[in-house]
Structure formats: structure tokens, C-alpha cells
Image (cartoon, rainbow, N blue to C red):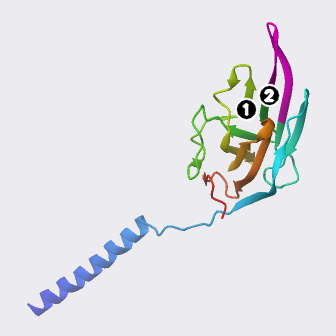
Amino acid sequence: MKKVKLILLVFTLVFASCTKEKIQKELPKPIYVGCKTNYIDYLPDSSFLMPVLSNKIYLLDLDQDSQNDSRIECENYHVSYGPHTYDEYNIDIEGINNVQFVVSYNKKIVNGSFINENLPYSSSLKIHKSGPGGISPYAIEEGFIGFRKFINGSYFYGWMKVKLGFSNNLIIYDLAISTCENASIKVGYHR
């Protein structure tokens, strides 16, 4: 009887250790890789001024790699509607060097949301337009713009905090871009 109990005990221990080993092989411990962000805080805040009756083009390097990634165009011109003449203002941002912007369709990108592959993107984005009909519904008065940059077969996601200032100029407070390939970035996060 002692032999049977001893054999059962050994069998139980061997089976338990095999089962434990099998479970550990099926469910490996997660490996956490620290994704860093390249963060730029513009001090003073970077202001792209609206010209008087002309257009002005600004170039912006989003990831500080010495290559311009975006083209910001600010336009101001007179438009005639019947006997009246109005000033019209446009601010457009265009991606260059494989940069695209999140198209939010009147939904604001908010602090704490994520910029990733699940969002719609476009190579250009109308940030602001105002004229005789007022400010367009897609204007970003203050908030975030999401973007992604395609480098060597992978996307790097980022965000920038912007505001329309007095006189329809665009102010960029800060921006961040992830250093990890194809990894989401949390809006407002920059550590």
C-alpha cells in the first residue's frame, strides 16, 4: 500500500510539473518594451502668422530629423459677394516626406485618445477657413491634430497641440511622435 501511495505521489508530482511547464510554455510572460516619444515643446509657442492679402508657406520638421515633414499654408484674400467684399482666411497643412494627418470629420481629437492605424488619414488637412459664412465646421479652434509618418515600411504616430490665435494665425504649442514602429501614441502623452 505504501508503494502504491508513493507511486501515485511521484506520478502526481511529475504530472503536475509537466502541466505547469506546458502552461508556462503556452502563456509566456509578457515582455514590456519602453516606447519613447520625441517631444518638442515650442517655447515660446510657434506662431504661423496670417499674411495680409497674400499667402505664406511655412515648413515644419515633425520628428527633428532635419527634413521638413509638413507644409503649412496660410492664405488671406478678398472675396466679392455681390456688392460686398469680405476677407477670407484659410489654413491648410500638407504632409510631405510620407506624412499623413488624421481626418477627424468634426470629431475632435481629445487629450488621452490614441493615434493609431484605426483612424482615417489624408495627405492634407484643412485646419481653418473663415469668410462671409463664418468659420467652417471643420475648423480646429483649439485642440489636437494627429499624424503619422511612414519610414522604412513602418508608421510612426504622433500628435500636435494647436490653437487658432487672434487674427487667424496658427499657434503650435507642442508635439510628440513615437519612436516605436507601428505603435499607438496617447494624445497629450510625452514621456
Kindly identify the amino acid type of the residue bearing the numbered disc 1: His
Q: Earlier in the sequence, mark 1 or mark 2?
A: 2
Q: Are marks 1 and 2 in contact (CB under 8 Å)?
A: yes
Residue of label 1: 128
Q: Specify whether residue 135 is painted magenta.
A: no
Q: Visible in this render: residue 6?
A: yes
- Which residue: 71% across, 49% down? 160
- Which residue: 84% across, 38% down? 71
- Which residue: 64% across, 34% down? 103
Q: Which residues are magenta?
A: 73-90
Kindly identify the amino acid type of the residue bearing the numbered disc 2: Tyr
Q: Quadrant of the C terminus?
A: bottom right
The answer to whether 101 is drawn above or below residue 1 in the figure is above
In the image as oriented, which residue stretches furthest toward the top?
Answer: 82
Left or right: residue 96 versus residue 125 is: right
Residue of label 2: 89
Tell me which secondary structure the magenta stretch mostly adopts: strand
The answer to whether 190 is drawn above or below residue 109 in the figure is below
Label 1 sits on a secondary structure element that is: strand
Based on the displayed image, in which of its 4 quarters is residue 14 positioned?
A: bottom left
The answer to whether 89 is drawn above or below residue 18 in the figure is above
